[in-house]
Image: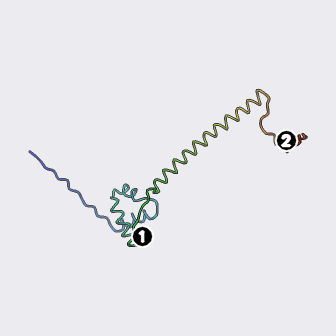
Amino acid sequence: MNNQVQIIKKQRSFSVDFKRSIVTEYESGIYSVPQLGRLHNISLSLIYGWIYRYSTLNERGTRMVERIESSEHKLKAMQKKIEDLERAVGQKQIAIDYLEKMIDLAQSELGIDIKKNFDTPQSNGLKSTVTK
C-alpha cells in the first residue's frame, strides 16, 4: 500500500505593527537584515520588502544595498582585535616582570644598581658630570 502524505504549509500573516517594528529595529542599526531574519525566522526578501514599504529613511525609487561588512562583521572584527591586543599586553607584561626580576637579582646577588637614581644629574655628553 502506497500512502502519499502531503505536508501542508501554513502561511503566516504579520500585522502592520509587527512589520513596522522590524523596520524600526533595522533602522536603529541594532540588527542587520540577516540577523532579523534569523531572529524572527522570516525570509530576507520579505524583510527587504517591508523596509521598502515602511521605512522612513528610504525614498521610493531608490535601491537599498546592505554592505557585507555589516555591524555583525564589524563586531567580530573588533572582538578579534581586542583579543589580539590583550594577548600583546599580556606578553609585554610577562617581559616586564622578567626584566624586573633580573634587575632585582643583579642588585641582590651582584650588588649592581641598575635602576635609575633620580637624584643624579644628567650628562650633557661633553664634560664629566659632577656628583654632589
Image quadrant assignment for residue 110: top right
How has the structure been colored for display? rainbow
The reply, left or right, for residue 47 in relation to residue 87 is left
Q: Amino acid at mark 1?
A: Asn
Question: Does the CB distance between marks 1 and 2 fall below 8 Å?
Answer: no
The mark nearer the N terminus, 1 or 2, is 1
Question: What percent of the width, then of the height, locates residue 100?
Answer: 70, 35
Q: Residues within 10 Å of mark 2 (few under 14, many from 20)?
A: few
x, y percent for residue 77: 50, 50
User: How many discs appear?
Assistant: 2
The kind of secondary structure element at disc 2 is loop
Q: Amino acid at mark 2?
A: Thr
Find the distance from the CA under tag 1 to the CA under tag 2: 69 Å
* Residue annotated with mark 2: 120
Q: Quadrant of residue 112?
A: top right
Secondary structure under the numbered disc 1 in the rendered image: loop
Q: Is residue 67 left or right of residue 110?
A: left
| Residue occupying image coordinates x 34% and y 66% | 49
The image shows residue 57 at horizontal and vertical percentages of 44, 70
Residue 83's disc is none
Q: Indicate the position of residue 124 as horizontal and vertical percent values.
A: 85, 45
Farthest top residue in view: 109
What residue would you read off at disc 1? 58
The residue at the point 32 percent across, 67 percent down is 15
* Closer to us: 49 or 41: 49
Name the image quarter holding the C terminus.
Answer: top right
**Would you call the spot at circle 1 few (<14 residues within 10 Å), some (14-19), or many (20 or more)?**
some
The N terminus lies in which quarter of the figure? Answer: top left
